Image (cartoon, rainbow, N blue to C red):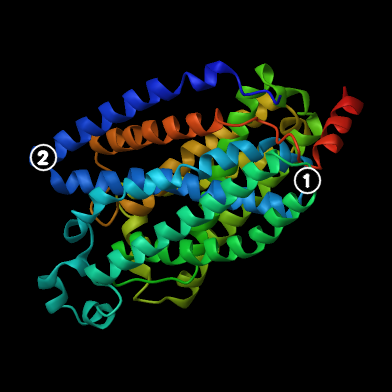
């Protein structure tokens, strides 16, 4: 019988659920106490972080099926469990439907009536069509997770290689569908916060950030659970090096898209697009942008260039943790400036929303991680991984 992950991880379910419900209760109370606008902004911020982690994890697990590699096998269950949170996140989108006219200018009839640009985009950016598209995205993601979970579980019951081939064929189509739906979701949920602005680089930038967040989170989890679980016997310095190199690649991809979006807008001197950056580099937002450039890219990029740092689980975990924290700041920088043009304002609602949604997310993640063996017992790649671990010992 395949071993399960340590009981200590299962014990996170109840505390995470309690923390999540309590924090969301405080956030909702703050919203009903005369600060509904602040609640919806904070909720969108928190929701963007956690659904991005689920979507990024789904993307990473599909990538590992397509590319192979020992790193993918030993982290596969972590990313599958993270992707399995998407059905719950679909339900948690419901509160945002009550705040559309608060969050989005295009959902305010009075604003649309006086703005030619909003009138031009109204056939696409309108509340009924927005809801239909959102339901479509969420249904597609739930369907992808359902098929992934179904066929991955089926592989646990058979040693036939066809089970892996089916997952690989599924991943070819699934990753294209995921990329397309995430692109439009980023346009609808985030880019339309600035309804008079658009960028073709923005949706891929958001998607790359989700992949980066997911991989960094997966590295943190695998380094924490490995010492007391069966997966620890498979983790070698070479696998940590592979994970660190992939993290560096995702970091460079995200930074490339972020920088070249800025460069193209600056070089073109486009009056319609420059205001988006002005709102995020003027006043109190300038220090946030500089911190993101320095700690969000510069510092982790520098450390991930060194092989000994990538091959050590503790130093790699520290770099991954820095990336996770900076991603939180990056989402905050993307979402909040349209509402606070003067700079970030200390408010406990965003903290409560992130902690609350995160508690629920982690409860589901821990439950899913405990439902199946940490190592797929019938994956044909497993003997190769175990042999490489024995040779490295």
Residue that protrudes farthest toward the right in the picture: 391
The residue wearing badge 1 is 69
User: Which secondary structure, mark 1?
Assistant: loop
Query: In the image, what residue occupies the spot 66% across and 17% down?
Result: 228
Tell me what residue is drawn at x 46 percent, y 60 percent.
140
Tell whether label 1 touches label 2 (CB within 8 Å).
no
User: Which numbered disc flags the more N-terminal residue, 2 or 1?
Assistant: 2
Specify the quadrant that holds the C terminus: top right
Please state the horizontal and vertical placement of residue 207, each as a whole percent of the image. Answer: 51, 57
Q: Is residue 141 above or below residue 378?
A: below
Does the image show residue 288? no
Instruction: Locate residue 188, reporting x and y percent.
Output: 35, 65
Of the pair 211 and 382, the residue shown nearer to us: 382
Assess disc 2: are there few (<14), some (14-19) or many (≥20) residues with their C-alpha within 10 Å of its C-alpha.
few
Q: Nearer the viewer, residue 124 or 113?
A: 124
The residue where tag 2 is placed is 32
Image quarter (top left, top right, bottom left or bottom right) of the N terminus? top right
- Find residue 126 and report its image quarter: bottom left
Direction front: furthest residue: 157
Q: Is residue 147 left or right of residue 76?
A: left
Q: Residue at x 46, y 53 (%)?
A: 142
Q: Is residue 331 left or right of residue 391?
A: left
Which structural element holds mark 2? Answer: helix
Crowdedness near tag 1: few (<14), some (14–19) or many (≥20) residues, C-alpha within 10 Å: some
Give how far apart the Cα atoms at labels 2 and 1 are.
50 Å
Q: Which mark is residue 156?
A: none
Q: Position of residue 20 (x, y in %)?
A: 33, 30
Q: Is residue 80 visible?
A: yes
In the displayed structure image, the side of residue 249 where residue 24 appears, left or right: left
């Amino acid at each position: 019988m395949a071993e399960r992950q340590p009981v200590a991880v299962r014990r996170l379910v109840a505390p995470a659920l309690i923390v999540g419900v309590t924090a969301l209760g405080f956030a909702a109370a703050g919203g009903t106490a005369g600060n509904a606008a602040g609640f919806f902004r904070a909720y969108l911020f928190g929701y963007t972080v956690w659904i991005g982690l689920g979507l990024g994890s789904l993307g990473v697990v599909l990538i590992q099926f397509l590319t192979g590699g020992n790193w993918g096998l030993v982290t596969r269950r972590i990313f599958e469990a993270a992707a399995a949170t998407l059905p719950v996140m679909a339900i948690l989108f419901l509160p945002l439907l009550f705040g559309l006219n608060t969050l989005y200018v295009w959902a305010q009839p009075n604003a649309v009536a006086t703005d030619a640009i909003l009138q031009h985009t109204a056939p696409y950016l309108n509340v009924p069509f927005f809801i239909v598209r959102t339901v479509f995205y969420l249904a597609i993601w739930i369907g992808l997770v359902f098929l992934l979970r179904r066929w991955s579980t089926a592989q646990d019951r058979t040693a036939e290689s066809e089970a892996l081939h089916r997952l690989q064929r599924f991943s070819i189509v699934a990753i294209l569908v995921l990329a397309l739906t995430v692109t439009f979701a980023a346009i609808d949920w985030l880019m339309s916060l600035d309804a008079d602005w658009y960028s073709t680089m923005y949706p891929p930038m958001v998607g790359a950030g989700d992949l980066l967040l997911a991989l960094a989170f997966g590295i943190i989890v695998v380094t924490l659970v490995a010492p007391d679980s069966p997966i620890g016997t498979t983790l070698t310095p070479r696998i940590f090096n592979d994970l660190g190199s992939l993290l560096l690649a995702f970091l460079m991809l995200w930074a490339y898209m972020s920088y070249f979006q800025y460069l193209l807008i600056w070089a073109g001197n486009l009056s319609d697009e420059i205001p988006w950056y002005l709102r995020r580099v003027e006043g109190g937002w300038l220090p946030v942008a500089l911190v993101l450039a320095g700690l969000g890219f510069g510092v982790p990029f520098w450390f991930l260039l060194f092989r000994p740092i990538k091959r050590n689980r503790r130093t790699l975990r520290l770099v991954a943790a820095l990336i996770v924290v900076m991603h939180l700041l990056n989402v905050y920088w993307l979402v909040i400036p349209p509402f606070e043009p003067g700079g970030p304002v200390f408010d406990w609602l965003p903290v409560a929303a992130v902690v609350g949604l995160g508690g629920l997310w982690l409860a589901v993640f821990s439950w899913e991680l405990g439902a199946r063996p940490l190592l797929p017992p019938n994956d044909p790649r497993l003997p190769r991984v175990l042999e490489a671990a024995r040779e490295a010992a």
